[in-house]
Image: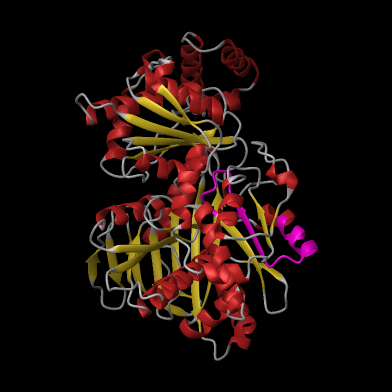
């Protein structure tokens, strides 16, 4: 399609919106784009914002390819149609709706609630912003058939999103994801959306519901005596303007911690995220104010959550008493080690316990669990697959913890998504437990490296915006899939796992086996020296992600820095070899 034809089609779509029942402000914006900004007009209308396997995510604005009340409305109408078809009969269908701090999140949440009500579905709507994990909890607690959270997680401020959950409290997976997509795609125009439902079908959830959620969370505590002994442990916490602002401090207090230090500027809920470039706790800059506060106060632990409080990034003090940020694999390893160790110490390991991790997450977590006789499940990237394993094993096996390298963790099974509120409380408890034993979280990590091997991980992302960017990412995956490297940093690639083709190939013998996980556009190279490189396009952002994991041995913990530096150099060499 040439650019002239594309522009003509875009203008046709824009004019269709102008003639549809949309608000006057949106019409004025479309007229402006038609007369003044062809590039933005094309980006806003060249396609429909895709309802993917989890929901919507995109830049806010007017148009078919933007997050606005009309694209949200069409998605909700399709979801309602599917719910009404899936749960026929006299019983009332119920849905719960939450939102984070982002601009327009409350508007989108209220719009969603009214559309659900207009379709005969009772909508529970949180009266203010709430963490995503509380939404997951509420679905199960209130006996709902579905749930929706308005959030774009850690994306930049111009984004918003819409995530859909099923009655088990987990994000939608097959067959519901594909079936809902089909229903959404059947909605051809704004005039098909029932926007105005009766107020009597919408019920507000007030702060009293928070206490129900927190009371379940407190039951996860394994070391109350250690917390009692270390209750004055200095902890800096920041919600980075997001929805963890109330519940994370409340959970820490209920666990018994009495010295939580705040950053007032970042306690202000603000969808513009004025104190950070990006509200992503995976990025060191997002925690810079928290780190400075910790240096000034002598705090031992720093924790920061993303806007919808399902991910947490942390910093701890190293052997030199310097504050260092941990990556998601390191934090997940510490959490798994602590929980599995304490379960075993308390006699709670009975032979049917398990953990779940994603395929791009460090194998160190598996090694820690297996040594204590705990089963390990590997799943595709996305916490919805961890939730599915919990559902499959309900009543048969006992779930301890799930983790993914992208700073998401879950303990217990009353929530079915990653939970930063819960994670903050348990990480703080692990810190208190370690301190009570005369060490620290960093010291504990070094002990783990000495026992199981020193693992170093890195994540690199290559961004490609817009329509042309999507094509470039597709071509990059094609190249890596069809022209794999023979070696990485001098070590032979002995296995190639291609989850799109569902095949695992042994490069030494030529033997090919079938992968059992669902189809996904993920490619992995595994070398003779246990290096693992995973490559996948992001499902929520315009980028391709490269995950690197390398392993070395520690003769003693004092060797950590030397070994870590060598492993980091190895990762950089692999990046160069792959051309990134």
Residue lying farthest to the right in this orientation: 296
- The front one of 426 and 471 is 426
Residues rendered magenta in the picture:
290-311
Residue at image position (43%, 62%) is 360
Above or below, comparing residue 151 to residue 508 in the picture = above
For the question of whether residue 486 can be seen, the reply is no
186 horizontally vs 27: left or right: left
- Quarter of the picture holding the N terminus: top left
Q: At which x and y percent is residue 270?
A: 66, 37
- The front one of 459 and 124 is 124
451 horizontally vs 242: left or right: left
Q: At which x and y percent is residue 423?
A: 51, 58
- Quarter of the picture holding the C terminus: bottom right
Residue lying farthest to the bottom in this orientation: 555
| Magenta span includes 299 | yes
For the question of whether residue 465 can be seen, the reply is yes
Q: At which x and y percent is residue 517?
A: 28, 58
- The front one of 223 and 262 is 223
Q: At which x and y percent is residue 162?
A: 46, 35
| Magenta span includes 69 | no
Above or below, comparing residue 126 to residue 515 in the picture = above
559 horizontally vs 10: left or right: right
Above or below, comparing residue 362 to residue 389 in the picture = below
Q: Quadrant of residue 177?
A: top left
Residue at image position (46%, 17%) is 13
556 horizontally vs 372: left or right: right
């Amino acid at each position: 399609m040439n650019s002239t034809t594309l522009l003509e089609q875009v203008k046709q779509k824009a004019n269709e919106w102008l003639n549809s029942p949309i608000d006057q402000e949106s019409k004025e914006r479309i007229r402006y784009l038609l007369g003044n900004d062809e590039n933005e007009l094309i980006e806003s209308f060249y396609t429909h914002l895709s309802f993917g396997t989890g929901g919507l995510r995109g830049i806010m604005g007017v148009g078919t390819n933007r997050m606005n009340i009309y694209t949200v409305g069409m998605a909700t109408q399709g979801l309602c149609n599917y719910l009404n078809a899936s749960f026929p009969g006299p019983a009332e269908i119920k849905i719960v709706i939450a939102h984070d701090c982002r601009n327009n999140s409350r508007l989108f949440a209220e719009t969603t609630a009214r559309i659900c009500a207009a379709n005969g579905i009772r909508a529970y709507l949180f009266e203010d912003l709430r963490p995503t994990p509380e939404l997951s909890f509420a679905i199960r607690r209130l006996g709902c058939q579905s749930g929706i959270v308005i959030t774009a997680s850690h994306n930049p401020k111009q984004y918003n999103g819409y995530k859909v959950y099923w009655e088990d409290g987990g994000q939608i997976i097959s067959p519901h994801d594909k079936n809902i997509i089909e229903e959404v795609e059947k909605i051809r125009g704004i005039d098909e959306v029932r926007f105005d439902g009766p107020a009597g079908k919408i019920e507000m959830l007030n702060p009293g519901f928070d206490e129900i959620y927190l009371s379940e969370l407190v039951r996860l505590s394994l070391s109350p005596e250690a917390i009692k002994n270390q209750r004055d442990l200095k902890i800096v916490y920041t919600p980075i303007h997001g929805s963890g602002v109330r519940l994370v401090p409340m959970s820490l207090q209920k666990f018994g911690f009495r010295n939580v230090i705040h950053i007032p500027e970042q306690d202000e809920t603000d969808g513009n995220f004025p104190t950070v470039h990006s509200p992503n706790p995976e990025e060191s800059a997002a925690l810079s104010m928290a780190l400075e506060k910790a240096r000034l106060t002598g705090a031992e632990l720093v924790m920061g959550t993303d806007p919808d409080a399902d991910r947490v990034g942390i910093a701890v003090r190293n052997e030199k008493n310097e504050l260092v940020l941990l990556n998601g694999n390191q934090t997940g390893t510490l959490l798994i080690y602590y929980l599995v160790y304490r379960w075993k110490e308390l006699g709670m390991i009975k032979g049917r316990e398990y953990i779940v991790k994603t395929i791009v997450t460090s194998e160190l977590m598996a090694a820690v669990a297996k040594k204590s006789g705990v089963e390990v499940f590997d799943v595709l990237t996305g916490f919805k697959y961890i939730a599915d394993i919990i559902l499959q094993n309900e009543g048969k096996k006992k779930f301890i913890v799930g983790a993914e390298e992208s700073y998401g963790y879950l303990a217990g099974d009353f929530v079915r998504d990653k939970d930063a509120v819960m994670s903050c409380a348990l990480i703080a408890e692990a810190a208190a437990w370690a301190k009570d034993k005369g060490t620290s979280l960093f010291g504990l990590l070094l002990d783990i490296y000495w026992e199981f091997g020193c693992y170093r991980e890195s994540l690199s992302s290559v961004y490609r915006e817009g329509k042309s960017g999507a094509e470039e990412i597709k071509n990059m995956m094609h190249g890596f899939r069809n022209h794999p490297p023979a070696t990485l940093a001098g070590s032979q690639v002995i296995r190639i796992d291609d989850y799109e083709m569902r095949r695992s190939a042994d490069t030494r013998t030529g033997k090919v086996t079938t992968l059992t996980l669902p189809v996904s556009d993920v490619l992995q190279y595994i070398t003779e020296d246990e290096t693992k490189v995973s490559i996948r396009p992001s499902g929520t952002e315009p980028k391709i992600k490269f995950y690197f994991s390398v392993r070395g041995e520690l003769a003693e913990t004092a060797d950590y820095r030397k070994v870590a530096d060598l492993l980091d150099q190895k990762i950089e060499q692999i990046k160069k070899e792959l051309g990134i």
